[in-house]
Image: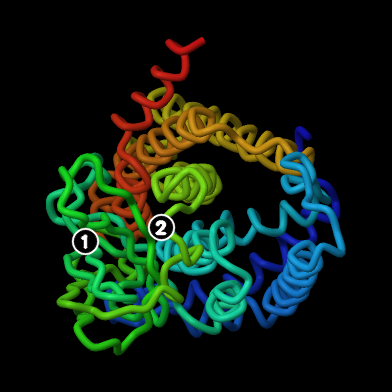
Amino acid sequence: MFEWSEEQLMIRDAVRQFVQAEIAPKREELEHGDLPPYDILRKLFATFGMDAMARERFKHQIEREKRVAAGEEATPTTKARRGGGDPNSIAMTMLPIIEICRHSPGMVTAMGVSMGLTSAAIMSKGTIAQKERWALDLLTLDKVGAWAITEPGSGSDAFGSMRSSARRDGEEYLLNGSKTFITNGPHADTIVFICKLDEGNPMEDRKILSFVLDRGMPGLEQSKPLRKMGMHSSPTGELFLTDVRVGRDRLIGETEDVASGGRAGAKDTFSMERSGVAAMALGIIERCLELSVQYAKDRVQFGKPIGEFQLIQDKLARMEVARLNVQNLVFRFIEMSAAGAPLSLAEASAMKLYAARAATEVAMEAVQLHGGNGYMAEYQVEQLARDAKVLQIYAGTDEIQITHIAKDLLRR
């Protein structure tokens, strides 16, 4: 795959029209007016039938899992579970990300954490009952989800420095701890809370468990949205748990011995999140380049358009190189997914590292090209530069990505 197909371009153009009509006019409210993004995203889902498709896929998967559980069908092999797929269908999951990120990257973060990370945590390790209870509403965005792993004292060292705990109390658990920088935290209806099992053993030896919580549970407090540098259309908050009592039915997998443990499940989720960052980066790069080319044609200095100066041409050329490279990473991801060949953690890390750096560099160069105007909120490149920076921080910092890549190389 080296370019979008005609069918994919039709999908792209339809999504672009929706974005221009429903998101672009509300950019000011999303950025500075505290407008939550969820109703707009639900309208997107309904407009393109994404909610109906999610329900249909969910129905088929649950029916198959029930047949396997009843012994009516063999357990699929790992390769069969990975499956493959229609590139157009896979592209449909990427194109809305790219198009929305041209105007409001934060909305993609809010959407991805809810229907992606939170639902994936339940769908990958949960029981059939748990999937039916929580996952479908997340996949259709009927409910908002949050995936809570980061704590005030644990960022890159998510597991080693984790202090949130689950303590057995008879047949139930008492959950305690706090989480921060939680996307959708202020508005989440469903929360996957990741913590350590407190058995009185050394902290580093404790099991990692994941529980599903609902808004309004006694002892659960969700903060108001935090103020931050960028991604204003993605509400971010803190969670505080004080003796939140839960039954085993809320423990993902309903066992403390989920295959490979909570660490493996969280790492799988990170891998999925990191590959999505490339699509986000592509949207930011495309829009910055588009705005910069137009500005270079329109802005006149020293008697001629600034696009005639070689230093400006150098900036535009480098932006285009970055666009091509990141687009090729997205194409590669689509092809691999269609072939049923998931990215390894190291590959996902490499994809995220390059794309995040490229988006940040392009956005900052777009600001520079716009000069003083680029520093003003009236010009969109100011917002995109703020939004791009977090791609180098969340889902694992650049430094963590480098560690994953290098360790993989050294193991060969």
Q: Quadrant of residue 174?
A: bottom left
Q: How many marks?
A: 2
Q: Is residue 290 visible?
A: no
In this view, 138 is above or below 193: below
| Residue at 65% in and 38% down | 342
Q: Residue 89's x, y, as percent?
A: 77, 57
In this view, 245 is above or below 17: below
| Residue at 72% in and 41% down | 78
**Mark found first going from the N terminus, 1 or 2:** 1
Q: Residue 229's x, y, as percent?
A: 22, 58
Q: Residue 108's x, y, as percent?
A: 48, 62
| Residue at 45% in and 52% down | 257
Q: Amino acid at mark 1?
A: Ser
Q: Residue 84's x, y, as percent?
A: 79, 45
Q: Which residue is mark 2?
A: 256
Q: Which residue is mark 1?
A: 165
Residue most extreme to the front:
170
> Position of 7 compared to 100: left or right?
right
> Foreground residue, 132 or 127?
127
Quarter of the picture holding the N terminus: top right
> Foreground residue, 24 or 223?
223
> Position of 273 compared to 222: left or right?
right
SS label for mark 1? strand
Q: Amino acid at mark 2?
A: Glu
Looking at the rendered image, the disc whose residue lies closer to the viewer, 1 or 2, is 2
Q: In the drawing, what numbered circle is on residue 271?
A: none
> Position of 135 compared to 227: left or right?
right
| Residue at 82% in and 62% down | 71
SS label for mark 2? loop
In this view, 65 is above or below 206: below
